[in-house]
Image (cartoon, grey):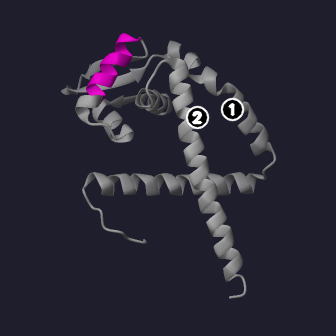
């Protein structure tokens, strides 16, 4: 148990660094959105579509944590601006399939180019095992975020430590 204070200190440092990274990421996203003339929700929607290709309006609502009404307004705005297409699902005419227009992708990537180059140089200094550890960490953090979002959406405010 000699290492417990060191582990507690390292864990506290990791948690602080994670909070600061999340905060700076959010500030960065606001700056990118402003530069593109978008809202952060617009940018989150477009980034999500860039990752998945196409999604239903309901999936966009879930991933952006917006109401379906807010997503409908956002998608109309993004469609009018030429960022997305929105087509009825041929299998279920009640659903709308939203797709990022490929010709707009480069425009959305441009503000991130310098950051991406710097991130690549940073990662070059890591071993394959370290990169794999980071990927596992991010995957687990994403799963935790999704679980917590689900819990919050369902009104469960109980504090749990599992």
Q: Quadrant of the N terminus?
A: bottom right
Residue 28 is left or right of residue 123, and the answer is left
Magenta part mainly helix, strand or loop? helix
SS type, badge 2: helix
Residue at the image position 47 percent from the left and 28 percent from the top: 43
Alpha carbon of mark 2 to alpha carbon of mark 1: how far? 10 Å
Q: Position of residue 88 (x, y in %)?
A: 25, 21
- 59 versus 92 height, above or below: below
Q: Position of residue 156 (x, y in %)?
A: 27, 61
Considering only order in the chain, which callout, 1 or 2, is on the residue closer to the N terminus?
2
- Closer to us: mark 2 or mark 1? 2
| Residue 136 shows in this picture | no
Residue 124 included in the magenta stretch of the image: no
Q: Quadrant of the C terminus?
A: bottom left
Which stretch is magenta?
71-81
Query: Pointer 2 and pointer 1: residues touching (CB < 8 Å)?
Result: yes
Residue at the image position 54 percent from the left and 33 percent from the top: 29
């Amino acid at each position: 148990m000699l290492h417990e204070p060191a582990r507690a200190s390292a864990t506290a440092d990791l948690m602080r660094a994670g909070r600061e990274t999340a905060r700076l990421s959010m500030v960065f996203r606001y700056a990118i959105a402003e530069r593109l003339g978008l809202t952060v929700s617009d940018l989150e929607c477009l980034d999500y579509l860039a990752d998945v290709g196409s999604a239903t309006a309901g999936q966009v609502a879930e991933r952006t944590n917006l109401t379906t009404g807010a997503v409908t307004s956002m998608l109309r705005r993004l469609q009018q601006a030429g960022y997305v297409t929105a087509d009825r699902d041929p299998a279920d005419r009640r659903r709308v399939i939203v797709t990022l227009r490929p010709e707009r992708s480069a425009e959305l990537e441009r503000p991130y180019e310098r950051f991406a180059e710097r991130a690549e140089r940073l990662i070059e200094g890591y071993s394959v095992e370290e990169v794999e550890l980071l990927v596992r960490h991010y995957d687990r953090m994403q799963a935790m975020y999704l679980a917590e979002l689900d819990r919050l959406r369902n009104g469960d405010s109980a504090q749990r430590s599992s």
